[in-house]
Image (cartoon, rainbow, N blue to C red):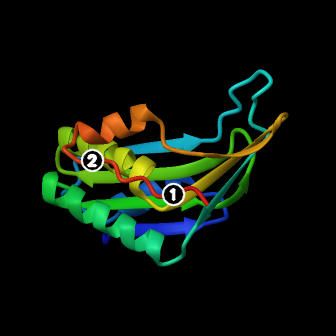
Amino acid sequence: MADAIRIQTQDFDVSEELALMRRGDGRVGAVCCFVGTVREAGGAEAVREMELEHYPGMTESAIAKMVDEARRRFEVLSSTVIHRVGVLAPEDQIVLVAVTSPHRRHAFEACEFLMDYLKTQAPFWKKETTHSGAHWVDARDSDDAALLRWGIQASNAPTP
């Protein structure tokens, strides 16, 4: 199966996506996936909604380069990256990163690498609305540090 990169407003079905990745490929010995969701966090700053924006074409191209780098580093048979945009509520799924590989170590590492890269380098802009108002959210220092352990320096895009 080829790599799949989709930016969409609609939700996704994780089990359906994983089954599609494995179907007809007897080389697959491991499937690893990460699903990110909108968390409320709680308190006065509890997230009421999150809005994600992107530049069509540019975002997919950046993610494709990231997938190519994962293939260079790890034994990846296929990958799926689905990222939702638009307005999302707490508990909604935001992102799916899934990888197939002949071996579990490569699947785990490739999935983690892709998520670390996606969190800091993909051109998405995130605005959180809380009880005290709306604000744009940048990558955290911990996200940049996670990427740095792969030998990649973060280059965050400016906030709109």
Identity of the residue drawn at 32% across and 46% down:
111
**Amino acid identity at mark 1:** Pro
- Front residue of 116/95: it is 116
**Which residue matches tag 1?**
158
Tell me the quarter of the image containing the C terminus. Answer: bottom right
**Which residue matches tag 2?**
153
> Is residue 47 placed above or below 52 in the rendered structure?
above
Front disc: 2 or 1: 1
Residue 142: image quadrant is top left
Helix, strand or loop at label 2? It is loop
Identity of the residue drawn at 51% across and 57% down:
158
Res 120 seen here: yes
Q: Is residue 89 left or right of residue 80?
A: right
Q: Is residue 84 left or right of residue 70?
A: right
Could you tell me residue 79's position as x and y percent?
33, 60
Categorize mark 2 by other alpha carbons within 10 Å: few (<14), some (14-19), many (20+): some
Tell me the quarter of the image containing the N terminus. Answer: bottom left
Identity of the residue drawn at 30% across and 61% down:
66
Could you tell me residue 117's position as x and y percent?
35, 50
**Amino acid identity at mark 2:** Gln
Could you tell me residue 19's position as x and y percent?
43, 57
